[in-house]
Structure formats: structure tokens, C-alpha cells
Image (cartoon, rainbow, N blue to C red):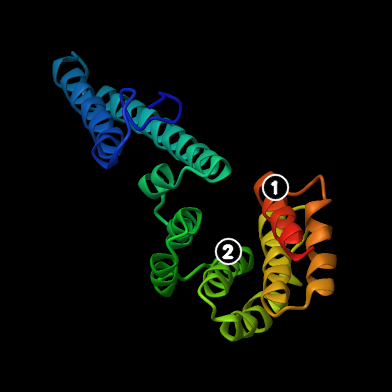
Amino acid sequence: MSEQGASFAGKQGRGWAWLASFVVPLMMAGAYCVLIATSDVGVSGALWEAGGFALVLGFWIAFRTLTRRAALARAIAVGDHARLLELARDPVDRAIAYEIRRDWPNALRTLDGAAPATPERQVIAAAVRIHALCETGEVAQARAILDRDVEPRAAQLDRRLHATGYDRALLARGRVLAAEGRTADAHAVLAKLADDVRADPNLRAEASRLRQIQS
């Protein structure tokens, strides 16, 4: 296990992630309490020291948020479903972990409890559901979700600002066409993604794989 992206003290796991989230802030709080108690300052001085703690705590929370997001993105990029499940707080991210693991029942079950707030996240969630349905032979349901939940929302996405959602929508469209046996249409859609150098490498690779299967 590498230290890169580790949760705490070079270790990974939910317990270590919990330690990273709570133990360090508690230690800092204890240190500042001792500082305030032993400092020969008045109320105003104590308030300044408390303000310093609040500032340090804010920096710590921001640092942890950024590192967690970076580790989450890396786990998705390299296909590390175990690490992704450890880090994910959003049901959509957990569903992606199950998608990577090809655990379709858990992917669908997790998405049943998801409530993505933005059009892009809604498209991503629907695309993962379509993947699971196509893999389990529920092509008619996949087509219904594509028409109802992906196509209208994908039209709202900006390719530059919402690249993941845009590419996921394209891949979902090609996946459904392929499952329906519309080989020529599927090939044309998948080629757009597979040949797009701006697209996510993993999604491009999946589009290329599906295109080869259809050839």
C-alpha cells in the first residue's frame, strides 16, 4: 500500500480516515486550550488566541477537503474501487466504485438512494445506472433512462465546464445503441468519444472497447 493518498500516518482504511478527520483537530484544540490557560493574557488576548485556533482549523479543513477530492479523483482515474469506497461520501461516487468492480446489483441499489443536486451529477448517476442495466440485460429500462434523464440534461451541459458529465452522456448513448443492436449508430457515437483527445482517458478507453466489440 503506497503512502500516496493515504488517509493518516501513511495508512489507509476507514479507521485511519476517521483519525485524520477528528484526532488532529482535537489535538490542536487541546494545544490551544493549554496555551490559553497558561498564557498571562487577559480576555482580549485569549480571544485573539482562540481566533488563531479558528484560523488554523479552517486551513486544516480546507487542506483535508482538497486532499480528499484529489484522492477521490485519482481513485476513479486508476480504477481503485476499494479506495474509492473508502473515500466516497456521495452515493454517486460509491456507485462508480461498484461500477468499476462490476458489481451491478450494488451499483443500482446505491443509486436508488442518490439525490444528485446538479445536472452534471444527475447525468453521471443516470449513465452509471444505464451501464448496470445494459450489463444485466435490461436494455428497455436503459433506453427509458437515457431518453428521460440523460438526453434532456446533457443538453444543458457545457463541454468545457462539465466534461465528465458530457462524456458520460455520450458513452451512455453509445452503450444503449450497442445493446439495442444498432451497430452503425453506436459506432458513430462511440467514435466521437474515443477519438476526442480532450475526453477522460478512461471513458475514451471504454468507448474504444465498445467500438471494437461492435466492429
Vertical position of residue 198 compared to residue 134: above or below:
above
Q: Residue at x 38, y 66 (%)?
A: 106
Q: Residue at x 75, y 65 (%)?
A: 214
Asked which secondary structure carries label 1, the reply is: loop
Q: Secondary structure at mark 2?
A: helix
Mark 2 sits on what residue? 121
Q: Is residue 162 visible?
A: no
Residue 204 placement (x, y as % from top left): 72, 51
Quadrant assignment for the N terminus: top left
Front in this rendered view, residue 183 or 144: 183
Find residue 183 and report its horizontal and vertical position in percent: 79, 73
Mark number, residue 130: none
Residue position marked by numbered label 1 in the rendering: 200
Place residue 6 in its image quadrant.
top left
Amino acid type of the residue that numbered disc 1 sits on in the rendered structure: Asp
Mark 2 / mark 1, whichever is N-terminal? 2
Question: Does residue 27 appear to the left or right of 79 in the view shown?
Answer: left
Q: Residues within 10 Å of mark 1 (few under 14, many from 20)?
A: some
Q: Is residue 144 left or right of residue 151?
A: left
Image location of residue 12, percent across then percent down:
33, 33
- Residue 212 vs 109, above or below: the answer is above
Q: Please tell me which residue lies in front, 87 or 19.
A: 87
Left or right, residue 71 beside residue 202: left
Three-letter residue code for mark 2: Arg
